Image (cartoon, rainbow, N blue to C red):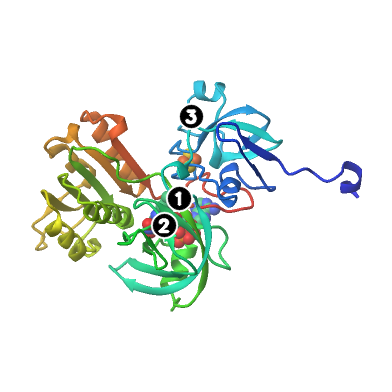
């Protein structure tokens, strides 16, 4: 009856004035979700309003925001019309300006059908999840994909953990850490999931190794090792000769994983490669002779830190701490690259009705 009185609500259309592209935004979807569904490589790293990667300038139209207190936009940005794709729901059709598309540096995202090929334990709380897809996928090491299964609301993001030797793969793999109370990881860890159907949307994200000559410093925590390992494997294939320091943070010895793969990488690397595991709560009486403390703090002792590129990945508090230490130590902000593994406990992670992760 109401529909008859007021007519059918038109689906808002977003025009990317900077690129001559248009896409529709179905009801309840964010601008970012709709762009990605349309195969447009709208930049994004966190999807929770924190990284600022998805910022765009609103030229015309009206929108509502999931989280109006986005920390990565200043009051001045806001007054100048800057908004976040992951937090914006169009109310009317929009015209926007975007600085660049992910597809200008890598393949555009698309949807793949797949199934679980294997689940292999890597540590007490991390597994390697390997998929079999219906067709090969190309990605830039450092990027991630959104996985979706029937019965769990919303997608979950996982970073590619292995660099394909031939540039693409139909058997991508991920490192998934169990999150207490988490829907997807509880499902994955509590049963034999081989053969289960899922969909993958990707590749997504901007995290990747950037061209430079100076040292590469990586700081990873938990399954944050996955994209770092993947990036370094690809750099080795590309005959990178830059020195590498890889700081890996865990609580106890049992958290250290992929040590053999990292040792092989270090042995094949044509320049110095230091792998430094750091444990924060290892028993003082144990046989551990390596570094202790918070992994981010270990950045400070590194030689040539200010001349290095810094790659940070893992739990947001660890990444935040490492980022501020690096900046305070004189590393320019455009030489610090971060990938934060946000989950749904972060406000803004769950958009109305559609449940992004
Ligand atoms: C870009 C990116 C890349 C990532 N890459 C990886 C990776 O390579 N490996 C990896 O292990 N993880 C990665 N993550 C994290 C991953 O996407 C999932 O968030 C994680 O696996 C948890 O999923 P889950 O379904 O088990 O937990 P969820 O069900 O999403 O729950 C996570 C936590 O939030 C709580 N929670 C759930 N709903 C709510 C709510 N409404 N309000 C408050 N709290 C809530 C839960 O109790 C739990 O503690 C990445 C995240 C991002 C953003
Ligand atoms: S702020 Fe939107 S993707 Fe990070």
Give the Cα distance between marks 2 and 3: 32 Å
Q: Residue at x 64, y 52 (%)?
A: 353
Provide residue 86's location: percent of width, then percent of height.
Answer: 54, 42
Q: Is 277 displayed left or right of 163 in the figure?
A: left
Disc 1 designates what residue?
107
Q: Is 175 displayed left or right of 95 in the figure?
A: left
Q: Residue at x 54, y 52 (%)?
A: 356
Give the Cα distance between marks 2 and 1: 7 Å
Q: Nearer the viewer, residue 315 or 30?
A: 30
Label 3 residue near ligand 2, CB within 8 Å: no
Provide residue 223's location: percent of width, then percent of height.
Answer: 32, 57
Q: Earlier in the sequence, mark 2 or mark 1?
A: 1
Provide residue 97's location: percent of width, then percent of height.
Answer: 56, 30
Tag 2 near tag 1, CB within 8 Å? yes
Give the Cα distance between marks 1 and 3: 28 Å
Q: Nearer the viewer, residue 101 or 337?
A: 101
Q: Mark 2, residues whose alpha carbon is within 10 Å: few (<14), some, or many (≥20)?
A: some
Secondary structure type for disc 3: loop
Label 2 residue near ligand 1, CB within 8 Å: no
> Tag count in the figure?
3
Q: Quadrant of residue 20?
A: top right
Q: Does residue 100 lie above or below 352 as drawn?
A: above
Secondary structure type for disc 1: loop
Give the number of the disc on residue 138: 2
Secondary structure type for disc 2: strand
Whether residue 181 is visible here, answered yes or no, is no
Disc 3 designates what residue?
73
Whether residue 234 is visible here, answered yes or no, is yes
Tag 1 near tag 3, CB within 8 Å? no
Tag 2 near tag 3, CB within 8 Å? no
């Amino acid at each position: 009856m109401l529909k008859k009185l007021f007519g059918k609500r038109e689906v808002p259309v977003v025009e990317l004035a900077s690129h001559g592209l248009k896409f529709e935004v179905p009801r309840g979807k964010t601008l970012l979700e709709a762009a990605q569904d349309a195969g447009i490589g709208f930049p994004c790293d966190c999807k929770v309003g924190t990284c600022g990667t998805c910022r765009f300038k609103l030229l015309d139209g009206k929108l509502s925001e999931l989280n109006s207190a986005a920390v990565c936009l200043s009051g001045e940005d806001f007054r100048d019309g800057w908004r976040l794709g992951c937090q914006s729901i169009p109310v009317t059709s929009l015209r926007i300006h975007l600085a660049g598309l992910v597809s200008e540096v890598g393949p555009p995202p698309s949807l793949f059908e797949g199934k679980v090929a294997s689940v292999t334990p890597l540590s007490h709380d991390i597994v390697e999840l390997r998929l079999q897809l219906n067709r090969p996928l190309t990605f830039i090491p450092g990027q991630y994909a959104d996985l979706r299964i029937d019965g769990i609301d919303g997608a979950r993001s996982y970073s590619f953990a292995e660099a394909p030797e031939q540039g693409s793969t139909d058997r991508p793999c991920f490192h998934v850490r169990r999150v207490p109370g988490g829907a997807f990881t509880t499902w994955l860890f509590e049963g034999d999931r081989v053969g289960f159907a899922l969909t993958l949307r990707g590749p997504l994200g901007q995290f990747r190794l950037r061209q430079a000559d100076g040292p590469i410093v990586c700081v990873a925590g938990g399954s944050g090792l996955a994209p770092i390992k993947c990036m370094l494997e690809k750099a080795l294939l590309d005959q990178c000769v830059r020195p590498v320091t890889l700081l890996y943070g865990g609580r106890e010895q049992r958290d250290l994983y992929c040590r053999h793969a990292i040792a092989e990488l270090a042995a094949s690397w044509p320049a110095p490669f230091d792998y430094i595991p750091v444990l924060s709560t290892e028993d003082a009486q144990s046989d551990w002779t390596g570094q202790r403390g918070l992994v981010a703090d270990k950045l400070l002792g590194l030689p040539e830190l200010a001349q290095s590129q810094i790659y940070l990945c893992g739990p947001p508090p660890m990444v935040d701490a490492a980022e501020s230490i690096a900046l305070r130590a004189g590393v320019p902000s455009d030489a610090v690259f971060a990938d934060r593994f946000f989950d749904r406990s972060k406000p803004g992670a769950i958009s109305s009705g559609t449940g992004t992760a």
